[in-house]
């Protein structure tokens, strides 16, 4: 007997940002697994279990959910944003590859969601309107030297860069080091967007320049978008400015 595991993106904040597919999978699940604050964002339903765990035990959480599904259960694993972007979908796939054979027979669905960089971009215009990339500043699972190499390559190639996992109590210096590295490639005038808790009641979006960007303006609820030399800002009377990437690049 085998069941189903749906890895669900909850979007950046309120339930209005979730897809209809995500809501249907949540309603059908007998158990919800996930990092505690994400599990708390799912409404309680009669007869539905919630199994919350710490943010640092992704593989253990994935294994527990897969084992539950392999016994015939219908299970949901929740992630903030999109489950395939620095989130639980890759941990579930890794657990399936490493785990017992019966986990490969589980009916697996990855349900997309609105990831943080899309929510932040929408809050201020269209800064991802041309070529862009996403990087995680966490060096928990990769060396910092690789992060620096990728930052330099992305900035040198003209990509707008979305920075995930910018700073935490355990990683207080990486964002400042990232800004310093980017300043060796990009001019100080390049726009930097700090989007904190976008889609939630305490949402805050601040537009700065790379030259003045302050790492202390961010926390783990912040997504940062670093523009390119072609990023534009449109000032508007009595309205927030618009930030956008022109549809053409390289003189085209």
Image (spheres, rainbow, N blue to C red):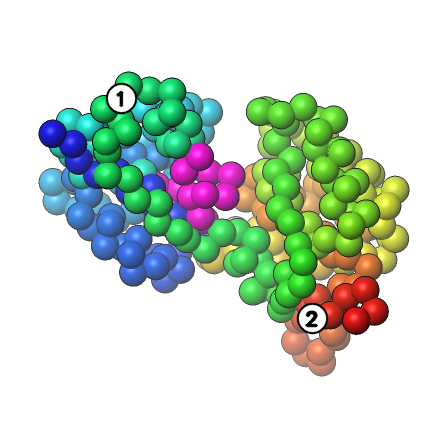
SS for dot 2: loop
Work out whether residue 186 can be spotted: yes
Q: Residue at x 70, y 41 (%)?
A: 216
Residue 4 placement (x, y as % from top left)? 21, 39
Q: Is residue 87 above or below residue 97?
A: below
In what quadrant of the picture does the C terminus appear? bottom right
Q: Kindly identify which residue carries mark 1.
A: 101
* Image location (x, y in percent) of residue 201: 46, 57
User: Mark 1 or mark 2, which is nearer the start of the sequence?
Assistant: 1
Residue located farthest toward the bottom when viewing the structure as drawn: 237
| Residue 66 seen in render | no
Q: Quadrant of the N terminus?
A: top left
> Label 1: few (<14), some or many (≥20) within 10 Å?
few
Judging by the rendered image, the residue that carries numbered circle 2 is 247
The percent position of residue 193, horizontal first and vertical second, equals: 68, 55
Q: Please, what secondary structure does the residue beneath circle 1 have?
A: helix
Q: Is residue 243 magenta?
A: no
Q: Which residues are magenta?
A: 78-90
Q: Residue at x 88, y 42 (%)?
A: 184
Q: Quadrant of residue 16?
A: bottom left
Return the mark for residue 124: none
């Amino acid at each position: 007997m085998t069941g189903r595991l749906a890895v669900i993106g909850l979007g950046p904040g309120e339930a209005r940002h979730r897809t209809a597919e995500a809501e249907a999978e949540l309603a059908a699940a007998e158990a919800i697994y996930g990092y505690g604050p994400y599990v708390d964002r799912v409404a309680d339903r009669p007869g539905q279990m919630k199994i919350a765990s710490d943010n640092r035990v992704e593989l253990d959480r994935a294994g527990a959910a897969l084992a539950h599904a392999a016994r015939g259960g219908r299970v949901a694993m929740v992630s903030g944003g999109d489950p395939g972007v620095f989130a639980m979908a890759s941990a579930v796939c890794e657990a399936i590859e490493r785990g017992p054979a019966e986990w490969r027979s589980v009916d697996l669905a990855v349900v997309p969601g609105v990831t943080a960089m899309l929510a932040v971009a929408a809050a201020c215009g269209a800064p991802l309107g041309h070529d862009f990339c996403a990087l995680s500043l966490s060096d928990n699972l990769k060396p910092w030297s690789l992060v620096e190499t990728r930052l330099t390559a992305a900035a040198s190639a003209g990509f707008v860069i979305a920075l995930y996992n910018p700073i935490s109590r355990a990683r207080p210096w990486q964002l400042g080091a990232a800004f310093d590295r980017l300043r060796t490639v990009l001019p100080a005038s390049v726009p930097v967007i700090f989007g904190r808790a976008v889609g939630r009641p305490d949402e805050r979006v601040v537009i700065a320049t790379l030259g003045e960007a302050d790492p202390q303006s961010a926390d783990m609820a912040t997504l940062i978008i670093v523009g390119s030399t072609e990023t534009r800002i449109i000032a508007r009377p009595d309205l927030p400015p618009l930030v956008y990437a022109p549809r053409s690049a390289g003189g085209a």
